[in-house]
Image: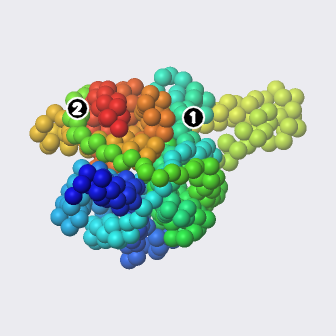
Amino acid sequence: MNSRRLAQLALAAALLLAPLAAEAAQLQAGAAKVDITDRDAAPVNDPLYAKALVLRSDAATAVIITLDAVAIGELGRVRNSFLPNVRGRLEKELQIRPSHVLINASHCHGIVCEDVEQRAVEAVKAAWRNLAPVRVGAGRGREDRIMENRRLQLKDGREADVRHAYSLPRDEDLAGIGPIDPEIGLLRLDRVDGQPLAVVYNFACHPIQGVPSRGNTADIIGFASKAIEENLGGGALAIFLQGCAGDINPVIYKDVHNPRDAEPLGNMLGLSALRALKTIATRDGGELEVVNQIIALPRATDLEQRIARIEAEQTRLLRSLKGTSLNYKTILPPFVQYQTFADFPSYASHRYLHEKSLGREGLGKLDEENRANMERYIQNIHTMEELTRLQVNMDLLKKHQVANAAAGKPVVDAEVMGMRIGDFVLITFPGELTVQIGLDIKKRAPAPLTFVAGCTNGYLYYAPTAKQRNNTGFAQEDCDCLLAPQWQQIYDQAVDAILKKL
């Protein structure tokens, strides 16, 4: 065979293989969801889901699983064995590397079914069967109406929390509040015909608003995902990744005048995401890269001292309680009178003038005594409120003191995953990061569309900033924490190294 004929055959082979090469370079994706609601545990307001997104390129395969659950292990129905068991099955049955499987909990407080592990695997298998070429786009949206920072900065330098577990500090003691992150991180995956296949959206807010019926619910995220999916149509899935929501509550979380209702908040989040999705253009290709690293974070060694400080403060507060003639029943009527009619609280003004004309001081002395008793009673109430905050937070510290002592080693392993899907870059942490940590990571990240997901691949409770962790006022994030303050520097260094590799 002459050289000319060989060249013709080579050209023909190249032309035949070109479509295959192009197809191999095209990112493939499949998405599916499975209901994981426990329908016997409580009345169901709306369903909970396990959602799966399988991504495959010529170089890698990755899986994102999201659960409408409180955590991946430790809390609720999702046991500590869930993560290794699901990864093990996916490796055995689909040959997917465990380090390429990302599992995120929305942190809603819904009750999932007992066989949630099996159903999560079913969702991945269904997504695998639906693999198809996709076009990829990334962007960001904004929503700042539905959440607030729950850490309250007090005038004396302490910080307290907005929680249902205890009372708020006095208004006059408040100096400021912490930040929020209004950014919605967005990944858009379209079929080759332009129809949406799936949307991944990342946002930072505790989905703990509840619904008027108090029924089982996926909360804000369930309603947001429903709004996105119904508007996109075509069976497209909205897949939520919880952000750095450790100190972020739904807005007006302590409202006692209206039923708790997550639906309006979820609808606002969903519509804001949709508004931004319309501006995102998708393209062929789409790089898929995954980096997975285990880092050792130091366990707290100062919990005994912190508990001792609380106990000393409790003793001081108990000794500050003052005796008063009033009780709950007898304080209410005079309190209203003295607040409403400060000059003449006990009777009409003419009676006071009459006593004065006779040189008597009976009503005045009565008012003086009542005011002193009410002041002591109200101060006792404020003291009681502070004692409740301290007691709840001390219980959290004691829980982690026991856990750290039983661990048998001074560090805890934390899995940190980095994932790039086109221009969408994600970094994770297995716990509840507070919002400032995410804001700082985004600010210094080399890729402009970098987002952070907490509650991913395990659960290490709260992970506040080093400054928050050393709060002398005691809040949930710094007490429901098994880590030493130095954890943040170690994590930040690992994050920066991973982001450089993506």
The quarter of the picture where residue 66 lies is: bottom left
**Which of these two is toward me, 424 or 275?**
424
**Which of these two is toward me, 484 or 498?**
498
Residue 264 on image: x %, y %: 62, 59
Q: Does 58 sit above or below residue 93?
A: above
Determine the residue positioned at 40% across, 76% down.
39
**Which of these two is toward me, 24 or 501?**
24
Spot the residue most to the top.
156
2 vs 1, front mark: 2
Determine the residue positioned at 74% across, 31% down.
364
Q: Does 432 sit above or below residue 36?
A: above
Contact flag, marks 2 and 1 (Cβ < 8 Å): no
Helix, strand or loop under label 2: strand
Which residue type does callout 1 highlight?
Arg
Neighbour tally class for label 1: few under 14, some 14-19, many 20 plus, Cα within 10 Å: few
Helix, strand or loop under label 1: loop
**Which of these two is toward me, 320 or 194?**
194
**Residue holding disc 2:** 298
**Residue holding disc 1:** 170
Spot the residue most to the bottom.
40
The quarter of the rendered structure image containing the C terminus is: top left
Spot the residue most to the front.
2
Tag shown at residue 420: none
The quarter of the rendered structure image containing the N terminus is: bottom left
Left or right of 417, for residue 390: right
